[in-house]
Image: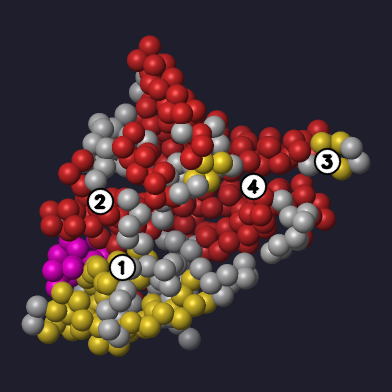
């Protein structure tokens, strides 16, 4: 693909810059002052939900690799927020666009894009993590409804969510990959209990969710009954793209560079220390590689060609790199890096400390690093499958 910028693209870049200058009062330090209002503003301007059709609440533009890259570059340069993300916007909405019914698309996508509905993901169970297809939460048919019983664990934002997209077993006699359905569940349905799980960040981002005879209409099944494994993998594809977003990582690198320019030891800026500067340059090179791999993925999406190995490395690359960027920030802060919670010397409201610990969890979540390496080796490089453990 020709990446040469035309005069039209130069005009588009100026358009994006003018937008960010005109609305500078609506955000600061990479954060919007009103997240939902900023999201609406971005959708109206075509800088969020850009290629989602207007009838589903998006902007309705044609896919364009260069314009997408220009938007990312200018938002990063201005330290401007890219809008809302999360499980609903980044994972469910594109899944519904691919496999949802027309009624489901019209009902759920637009309010999700606007941030009016918070979603959580009901995949993992106490006995079904890496082997997700072994899940046991069951849905029994009763008239036009399913009656759901079982539990989920590590459910992000379940304590805040209005809806869950969830995997349940609807055909218990079928092979484990073939008896699963993907269903949308209101979190205020009778019989749902949410219990928080506090992590080492000191917060309860994750939860346990228990279902006791929860009734859900069969019309809430996405992609057809018994096709949940296929739909689930569609969502996982978008989840891994979200966790490995090169634009978010590049923005984080920019914040690290600013930190290293302002923090000093013995009167010397951290960025001028050769040891720290060398570590920064190594991370910067990897972020550049991640950016260009992202362009490769955009090209594949537009041409309809399989992304192949380029798509398989995204989640592993992004999560590990984000954690290493946070680790360098902690080291650059010196004794201030061990601070937590509130205090007069805390930098960036403790964002780096929290990210360092939370990102370690993301290396595990969404498919552990070890599982991702197996996928890359077997599906991307054609290596033999990992031997199964010997039976006792």
- 315 in relation to 130, above or below: above
Using the numbered discs, state the Cα–Cα distance from disc 1 to disc 3 in whole angstroms.
Answer: 47 Å
Q: Which residue is mark 3?
A: 264
User: Decide: marks 3, 2 in contact (CB < 8 A)?
Assistant: no
- Mark 4 residue element: helix
User: Decide: marks 1, 3 in contact (CB < 8 A)?
Assistant: no
- Mark 2 residue element: helix
- Seen from the viewer's position, the closer of residues 326 and 309 is 326
Q: Which residue is mark 1?
A: 163
State which quarter of the image contains the N terminus. top left
Using the numbered discs, state the Cα–Cα distance from disc 3 to disc 2 in whole angstroms.
Answer: 47 Å
User: How far across and down, in percent of the image, does residue 132 sit?
Assistant: 36, 71
Q: Which residue is mark 2?
A: 110
Write the residue at 33% across / 82% down: 192
Earlier residue among tags 1 and 3: 1
User: Decide: marks 3, 4 in contact (CB < 8 A)?
Assistant: no
Earlier residue among tags 2 and 4: 2
Write the residue at 41% across / 44% down: 38
Magenta part of the chain:
218-230
Earlier residue among tags 1 and 2: 2
């Amino acid at each position: 693909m020709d990446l040469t910028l035309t005069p039209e693209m130069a005009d588009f870049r100026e358009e994006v810059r003018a937008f960010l200058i005109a609305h500078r009062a609506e955000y600061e330090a990479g954060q919007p002052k009103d997240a939902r209002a900023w999201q609406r503003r971005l959708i109206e301007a075509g800088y969020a939900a850009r290629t989602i059709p207007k009838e589903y609440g998006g902007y309705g533009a044609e896919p364009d690799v260069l314009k997408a890259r220009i938007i990312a570059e200018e938002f990063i340069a201005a330290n401007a927020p890219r809008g809302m993300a999360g499980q609903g916007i980044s994972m469910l909405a594109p899944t519904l666009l691919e496999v949802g019914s027309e009624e489901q698309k019209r009902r759920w996508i637009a309010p999700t894009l606007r941030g009016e509905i918070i979603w959580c993901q009901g995949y993992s169970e106490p006995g079904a993590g890496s082997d997700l297809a072994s899940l046991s939460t069951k849905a029994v048919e009763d008239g036009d409804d399913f009656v759901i019983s079982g539990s989920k664990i590590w459910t992000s934002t379940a304590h805040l969510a209005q809806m869950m997209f969830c995997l349940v077993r609807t055909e218990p006699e079928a092979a484990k990959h073939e008896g699963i359905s993907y269903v949308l569940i209101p979190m205020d349905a009778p019989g749902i209990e949410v219990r928080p799980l506090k992590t080492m960040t000191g917060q309860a981002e994750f939860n346990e969710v228990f279902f006791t005879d929860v009734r859900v209409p069969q019309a809430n099944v996405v992609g057809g009954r018994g096709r949940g494994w296929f739909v689930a993998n569609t969502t996982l594809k978008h989840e891994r793209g979200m966790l490995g977003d090169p634009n978010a990582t590049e923005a984080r690198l920019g914040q690290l560079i600013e930190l290293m320019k302002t923090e000093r030891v013995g009167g010397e800026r951290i960025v001028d220390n050769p040891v720290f500067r060398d570590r920064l340059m190594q991370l910067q090179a990897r972020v550049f590689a991640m950016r260009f791999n992202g362009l490769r993925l955009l090209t594949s999406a537009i041409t309809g060609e399989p992304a192949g190995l380029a798509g398989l490395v995204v989640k592993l690359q992004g999560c590990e790199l984000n954690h290493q960027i946070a680790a360098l920030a902690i080291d650059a802060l010196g004794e201030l890096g061990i601070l937590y919670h509130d205090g007069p010397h805390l930098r960036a409201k403790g964002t780096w400390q929290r990210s360092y610990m939370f990102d370690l969890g993301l290396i595990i979540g969404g498919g552990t690093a070890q599982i991702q390496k197996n996928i890359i080796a077997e599906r991307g490089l054609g290596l033999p499958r990992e031997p199964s453990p010997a039976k006792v």
